[in-house]
Amino acid sequence: MRLRRYIALVLSVAVLLAAAGCGDRQPVPAGEQGEPLATVNPNNEKRFAYAITYAEDSSQEVKELAKEMRKTLRGTFSSSVTLTTASKSSGGMEILIGQTGQRETQEAAQRLKDNRQLYYLDFIIKVIGDKIVLYSENDSMLQKAVSYFTETYCTGADAWNQLTTLTEIIYEAPLEAKPHELAGTPLEQFTIVTPRDMEYIYGRAVTELVEYLNQDQGYTLPVQDQRNEPVEHEILIGNLEREESRAVSVSGENAWILRLANGKLVIKAGSSLALWAGIHAFTEEIRRQAAGAHLSLADGYELTGVYEPADDEYAYVWGDEFNGNALDRSKWGDYYNDPVGNTAPSLLGGQFIQKGYENVKLTGDGMATVFTERNGKDFTGGYLCSDDHMQYRYGIMEMRVQLGVKPAHFALWMNGGNIPRGAAAEFDLLENFGETDSFASNIHNWSEGMYHTSLDGGEFQEAKQYHFSDSLAPEEDLSNSFHVYTLAWDDRKVDFAFDGKVFFSYSLDDHENVDYCRLSTLLLITANMGGTGWGMKYEEGDPEYAELKVDYVRLYQRADIGLFYTADQIAAMERPAED
């Protein structure tokens, strides 16, 4: 388990604290040591004085370490210990972990930033009033802060008594400053600019670049979409509506180019995969130069290349751009579990009729429209399904989609194919349940005898929810514009991403009995309304027609682990064995 690894790091963190000369940085006047901290709740002597409160968006590792802290405190003081999230905090004495949004957390964060310029890999433990704040901008370092606090102060009464009302500890990570620069401007002054609907396939390289500089130099390059006003120093990713980006062209689908001009670095490519390679090449150039001195690129610098994927890198294997006026029936067909013509009761006393691919239209504009509609008391739904035509195991599935209006229920999901086996995974990338400003992701296990588990409830209930808001277009919801939805699935984890950024991750290493997550799946894109079994209730006066628009569907796989099944292979697997 990762938890054990982080606790094992406590001793090394303590050594680093001493080596960095940080220790307890207590601004305590001579003769003042502060007051000891309480151990018993004033309202309940059987409860520990401090509740443990972690930020709503804490990583799974931080949550596990918070649980370990609670367990340790329980044993030390033979008391019950409250563990909760920031949104459920009742105030009072608390150990605040991460960005809880509380005033004390903000104060400690500012103290950390004021301590030194390269603070990103630092952490702070600070007592402020009736709060003990544990904070870092970096999740890995926050984990170390929680581990250090648990091992140093929670293992015994004497250890706890080392804390006082004046305790302040700042750990400064040892960093070797590298004055990287582009056209004479420090790299840390640049802003990364991307399309609004960034794709994960190259967005992961943007994340790699930001994280590398975070961990190596301690500063964070801001990432903004191109709707923001231009600033003087920018790294422009992809085909943007910026003059500098339009001035750079690239020849060939797999080609990429880096060009530095007028204080802006342009990275463009002939495809999304090649764009990943170009951004990755820039990060590698920083690494290479940093091994000797630092990166220094002059105005007019240019670097070009061609993306040729190795077996452990991604290649395009399947998809549909929906060009033309008719659905490509070599890619899409019936869903075995809900065939065209299937019926069920509707909420208005009529029938819900599954029309499947019959409720899909192409009009030559490069889009597929999947629609659902009402006819009196009856409703019809539609879908795109790859069942008999394509199934896959592991890969990056990306879809650029615009959802429809309430109360229609839309879903982007992968389900186990109809081939002989005892279990199947269902990966729900998006289920909006009729909402237009939020959706949920999920992983289901379906096994013989209808045994079923999912990530509903428990530790993943909040983490798998996505709530949409856009400060640049506050009036918009998911039915107003296109966004990129991604399921990135390999043999180690499943990532769910929105516009290129992961919002929920499920590790296959840290959970037992996940072999069902290593079986092939098919793709479904569905639009339904008026049924009794899912989504927001349909009421009189609601829209009688709703549609989901799909710009493209693209599947990328690695040759070393990916499996891809064509129609002939699927038919052979489904065929009953001969006597």
Image (tube, helix red, strand yellow):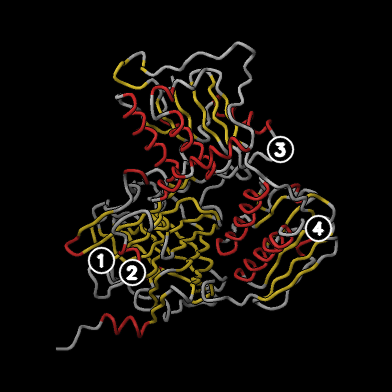
Quadrant assignment, res 207: bottom right
Of the residues under marks 1 and 3, which one precedes in the sequence? 3
Residue 426: quarter of image: bottom left
Q: Which residue is mark 3?
A: 117
Find numbered disc 3 in the image and state the secondary structure of the residue it sits on.
Answer: loop
* Of pointers 3 and 4, the one earlier in the residue sequence: 3
Q: Are marks 1 and 2 in contact (CB under 8 Å)?
A: yes
Q: Secondary structure at mark 2?
A: loop
Vertical placement of residue 173 versus 352, above or below: above
Place of residue 229 in the rendered image (x, y in percent of width and height, measured from the top left): 74, 47
Residues 33 and 315: in front is: 33
In this picture, residue 519 sits left or right of residue 284: left
Instruction: Give the mark nearer the N terminus: 3 vs 2.
Output: 3
Residue 169 x/y as whole percent: 57, 29
Q: Position of residue 310 (x, y in %)?
A: 56, 76
Kind of residue indicated by mark 3: Gln
- Numbered badge on residue 296: 4
- Residue highlighted by disc 2: 519
